[in-house]
Image (cartoon, rainbow, N blue to C red):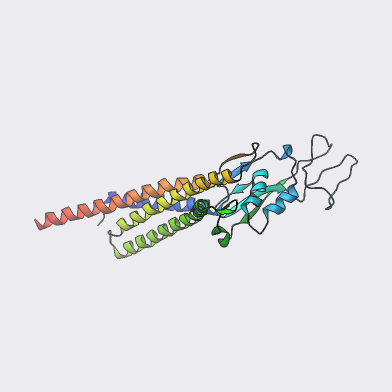
Amino acid sequence: MVDNRYATALVIGSVLSLLATVYLSVAVGTEHWFQYSSPLDSQDLNITKLKDQFINEEFEEKIYSIPLFSLNGTLGLWWRCIQVPSQSYWFREPDGRHPHNESVDRTQLPDCTHHRGCTDPKMETQCLSFTLPQQFKTKTKGEEEDLLRTYLWRCQFLLPLVSLALVFLSGLIGVCACLCRSFTPTLGVGVLHFIAGLCSLGTVCCFRANMDLFHYSYKPLATVDWSMGWSLYLALISFPLQMMAAALFIWAARSHRNHYTRIRAYRVA
């Protein structure tokens, strides 16, 4: 029979583990780890050219970093996105015409302060995913290989997968322990959660260090602001949740073992 204290610790630890898994899964699947903000109306931008650079299949950081900085881009572990004017927007010229064809120059945003009846263009987000070969591609610094950024990039997308895999494995061990009516595997569940928490923290650290080196290699303009996104904070929140779950599982396992040993010694005596 399990003491109520240990059963409560197991329930709370399981809830914390579930929350951490949900947060980390959402963070991995979204693109708001890092975001840029740039004043489009104050820059002489050729949006069509920047968009073509962004969707370039060659996957060169030097090429897609420019539209990422200039078009309010966001960056994640598996996604990169920019904001571009929607193809469906329209504005009225001074002579009353309503251009809807492709002859309209869409490379410049319309200035609504000088045109009567002009409407601000509707912005849409265009995203591209990183393929698996692109995740393992070697980063470069000029013409030389940048091994530090290469391994940071690989770690930042491998570590969260390892963390989720460890939590899934610990869940299987917990289910087997319940079926076998054994409390001993709970210690292993706690250790796995502890390692998973370290992997979650390592993901955030690797991503943040990688972004600093990315900005050092490809310097954004002074008018471009950048900040950490909510996806990164979700991954960061999963770390203490996994650590608290690990502490509860380890405490419950060790305390139950000591309590069971004392009871058996008392009965023998």
Which one is in front, 171 or 196?
A: 196
The x, y position of residue 171, in whole percent, is 39, 59
Considering the image in quadrants, where does the N terminus appear?
Answer: bottom left
Q: Is residue 94 left or right of residue 192?
A: right
Q: Is residue 249 visible?
A: yes
The residue at the far top in this view is: 113
Vertical order, 12 against 130 (above or below)? above
The x, y position of residue 263, in whole percent, is 16, 54
Q: Is residue 201 left or right of residue 121?
A: left
Residue located at (48% from left, 47% from top): 204
The residue at the far front in this view is: 143
Residue located at (89% from left, 42% from top): 96
The x, y position of residue 181, in whole percent, is 29, 62
Q: Is residue 72 visible?
A: no
Q: Total label count?
A: 0
The x, y position of residue 238, in whole percent, is 45, 48
Residue located at (35% from left, 60% from top): 174
Vertical order, 52 against 227 (above or below)? below
The residue at the far right in this view is: 95
Q: Is residue 68 left or right of residue 89?
A: left
Quadrant of the rendered structure where residue 230 is? top right
Which one is in front, 68 or 172?
A: 68
Q: Is residue 93 left or right of residue 56?
A: right
Considering the image in quadrants, where does the C terminus appear?
Answer: bottom left
Which one is in front, 242 or 181?
A: 242
